[in-house]
Image: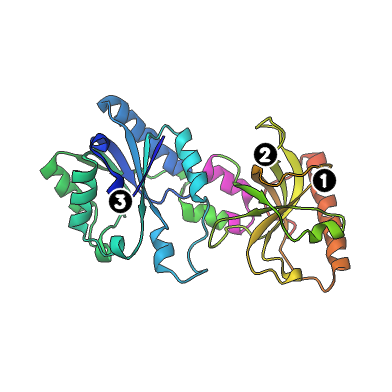
Amino acid sequence: MELIRGLYNLRSQHRGCVATIGNFDGIHLGHQAVLGQLSEQADELGLPLVVITFEPYPQEFFSAAGESPPRLTRFREKLQALRRYGVDRVLSLRFDKVLSQMSAEAFIEQLLISGLDVRYLVVGDDFRFGHRRQGDIAMLRAAGDQHGFQVVEMHTFDVDGERVSSTRVREALGAGELNRAAQLLGRSYRMSGRVVQGDQRGRTIGFPTANIHLHRRVTPLRGVYAVEMFGLTGDVESPIKGVANIGHRPTVNGSRCQLEVHLFDFDREIYGEYVQVEFIKRLRDEKRFDSFAELKTQIELDAAQARALFETNSGSGDDEAA
């Protein structure tokens, strides 16, 4: 899969494609249905499948720090997922002041016509683009009729009568309903990242942790979870079980939100390893303790609860123990 960063990196060989436009945050079942629909058209027309996305997301650009919707997937995670669904190219447009002020007409001409020569385009029925969101699907269809490309609305994808969307996934994760999030995503929710060196306070109380930076302005999860970590055994499907905290670590006056994972029955230096953490069950909210002794006692309880969960294999994925 080819990653193209910015309109200025489009070349003549990139012209002629089927495409879709959006954030594609989470690559949930609705996104997967769109990619399946596009893949069929790409095969029929003999053209590459291109996903046009934005970095940062428009909502992040227009929102104050910490007020944008939580990201389900960081950029690298999204690329990994798109690769699995047969995407040939990803065009990542930097959403900045220049792009935000581009007219809808210029967006169509520079991107869809001159840049990509799109032959088949799939967008949501509520898709808006261009300065002050002046462009809509009617404008795209008019341009398509004039320049010879077809514009199709994304099919609504429902699960149990509920429209699948990134917002619904965020809501499920925020409520600790991990099973529901998995139903909407078509897989269990994971976060990935590289293990970095922390302040090693966990070692002083007998609970060393693998620290992972989240690369998100806002995270969809907060609290303590039973987890499984993938990527350390050489077998991609053989995880190591553990307990994790995701948040700002109020007991130590932490300022940056990060993921800390204590792995059970594991003792090896893993700095620099790229891992995936799958969230199995939410155990409780993050809270501040008055002393490290209190924190240690609570972590012991959290670890015992997570171990019992894994031993009985009875986790429901819902937040029943907050």
Q: How far apart are labels 2 and 1 at the CA level?
A: 17 Å
Q: Residue furthest left?
A: 146
Q: Amino acid at mark 3?
A: Asp
Q: Which residue is mark 1?
A: 307
Q: CA distance from mark 1 to mark 3?
A: 46 Å
Q: Would you place residue 160 above or below residue 49 in this image? A: below
What secondary structure is the magenta-colored segment mainly? helix
Q: Is residue 135 left or right of residue 38?
A: left
Q: Tell me the residue at 31%/55% (across/down).
A: 126
Give the percent coordinates (x, y) of residue 90: 38, 42
State which tag comes first along the sequence, 1 or 3.
Answer: 3
Q: Is residue 116 magenta?
A: no
Residue 241 visible from this viewpoint: yes
Q: Which residue is mark 2?
A: 230
Q: Nearer the viewer, mark 2 or mark 1?
A: 2
- Residue 125 disc label: 3
- Quarter placement of the C terminus: bottom right
Identified at 30% across, 45% down, the residue is 9
Nearest-to-viewer mark from 1 and 3: 1
